[in-house]
Structures are given as C-alpha cells and as structure tokens.
Amino acid sequence: MIEYNKPFLSIEKQISLLKERGLIIGDKQRAEFFLHNISYYHLSIYTKAFQNEENKFKQDTDFDDVISLYNFDKRLRLLLLDMLERIEMSLKCVLAYEVTRYKDDNYWYAKGDNFKNGEDDIENILKGIVDSSEIYIKHYYDTYSDPGYPPAWMFFESLTFGQSVRLARNFFDTERQIIAGFYKLPKKTVTQMFYYLSHLRNVCAHHSRVWNRRFVSNVAKHPKYENIFGDTRRGSLYAYFVVMQIFLVKISPTSTWLDKLDGLIKEHDIVIYRMGFPNDWRSKLESIK
C-alpha cells in the first residue's frame, strides 16, 4: 500500500497535463467549459481509450475524440434507461396482476410465509410504503383504515426495479413459475435475469460508464441462447444486451432500439469489441425469439 499524494490541479494545469501527454486541444475555452462541468476525473475514464500504458495519447488524438466517446456513453445510457423502464413496468405488472390473481389475495405481499426468507426481506420495503409521499399511497391511508397496507397493484407501483427483483428472487417455486410462464423462460433463471437488468439500470441511473464496463455478475449460461452469447465475456455489456433483448422481444416487439443503437455506434465510430460485441452482434440480437 502506498500513500495517495496526487495534488489538486487547477483547470489550467489539467489542460497543460493533457497537452503534455499528447492530446490535441485546439479550442482551449471549449475544453475549459467541459472540465468545469463534467470534471477531469470523470473524463479521464474516456481518455484511457486513447492512451497507451504510459498515459501518452495516440497520435492525432483530439479533445473532441474524448468528448465524442463521452457523448456516446451518455446517449447509450439514455437509450438503455428507456428500454429498461419498459422491462421494469412489465415485471411490476406481472407481480401485481398475475401473482395476485393466483394468490387470490390482494395483500399477499405483506405476509412473510409467501417468501423464502419470511418477513425479514420485506420489512424495510413495507415501512417505506407506509411512509411514502406518493399521492395515491397517501390517499389510501387518508381514506382507509383497514387493512394496514394498500392492495398489491398500489404496492408494486411504488417499488423500485431493484426492490421488485429482490422480492421476486425470494419467491417459492410456484410463484417463480408464474413469472417464468409469462415470459416463457425457465423458472431457474428468470429472476436472476431480472437481477442483471436491475444492476444495469442502477449503473445507468447513477451516470456511471456503461460503454466498456465489465460487470461484476457474469450472465449465467442458458442453453437456448448459447449461440447468441457465443464466446463473448459473460460480464460484458453485450451479454447484458442479450438478456435485455430476450425480454424486449416479448414485451416490446416493435421496438426500434437496435436501429438506434446501431446508429449511435456508427455516428460515434465506436470500436465494438470494447463492449464485448461480436462483429455480427446485430443479426444475433435480431435472431432472439
């Protein structure tokens, strides 16, 4: 272990350092604007793609190259958030409607014996619902005194994607089969697949890099889709895209997100292997049924 002793650098010194390392900065004022509003540290994530092991920039690398990559990543996150929102809403609807219909109990979610870990897993979530500032939740408690929690369709509307996934992963096999049956996926893997996407959603929502990210959780093998994954890293962005597309073809079959993704890649001249993409990535994703 060594002590961290890198000094604070003014914007002027940040620009000088980038120039010393070989980055072309034709418009200093423009560079200052970005460094003031994005930060040198955040942009350094993207500069690495244009540097060698000695932190020297490849020949003819311009500041605009870095900004283009940054903008690609930002636009990619926005595209992903749009698609992931559709998946989130679908899961909530399945939990609120399909499982509630099976249970024949509008308040089943508040009963610990419906979950493998009992009440421990939902205690904090239930407290959050009671304290919620959502208008429809407040209206419920202002109007009704019993039972102590709102019906399932209000409850799941109030949850985050992560909370919904956490509850679903805590189901017994019967309830998991309801979810799996709706999406026509194996009950052993369906909730885990939702977990991957909830993690991807959190990364996007916190403005973190997705472009060449290596995710901690590797996508589990699935015999039906092995040819789609191919030899790509299971923790790559492409692997997560495969999982996302598996759901999207079922809940948003007319989506043009692949066109938009393809357009972004071409517009920003992105090297796709950094995202784990095979050369035939589009045809593979389009072949998912």
Image (spheres, grey):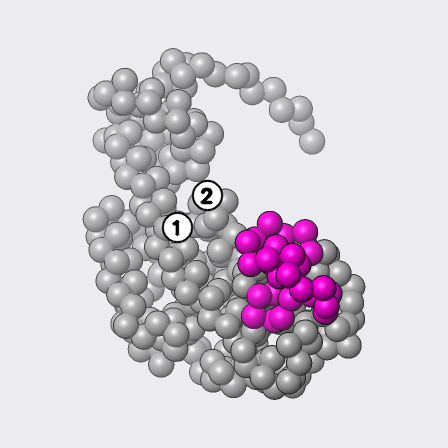
Q: Which residue is mark 1?
A: 77
Residue range corresponding to the magenta coloring: 129-155
Q: Which residue is mark 2?
A: 207
Q: Position of residue 153 (x, y in %)?
A: 56, 70
Regarding residue 21, the answer to whether it shows in the image is no
- Indicate whether 140 appears above or below 8: below
Residue at the front extreme of this rendering: 143
Picture residue at 50% right of the left edge, 72% below the top: 93
Q: Residue 169 appears in which quarter of the rendering?
A: bottom right
Q: Nearer the viewer, residue 53 or 177?
A: 177
Picture residue at 23% right of the left edge, 20% below the top: 27
Provide the secondary structure element on which disc 1 rests.
helix
- Indicate whether 152 appears above or below 161: below
The amino acid pointed to by label 1 is: Arg
Q: Position of residue 52 (x, y in %)?
A: 39, 36
- Magenta-colored stretch includes residue 152: yes
Left or right side of 183 for 114: right
Please identify the quadrant where the C terminus is shown: bottom left
User: CB of mark 1 within 8 Å of CB of mark 2?
Assistant: yes
Question: Callout 2: 10 Å neighbours few (<14), some, many (20+)?
Answer: few
- Magenta-colored stretch includes residue 58: no
Regarding residue 262, the answer to whether it shows in the image is yes
The amino acid pointed to by label 2 is: His
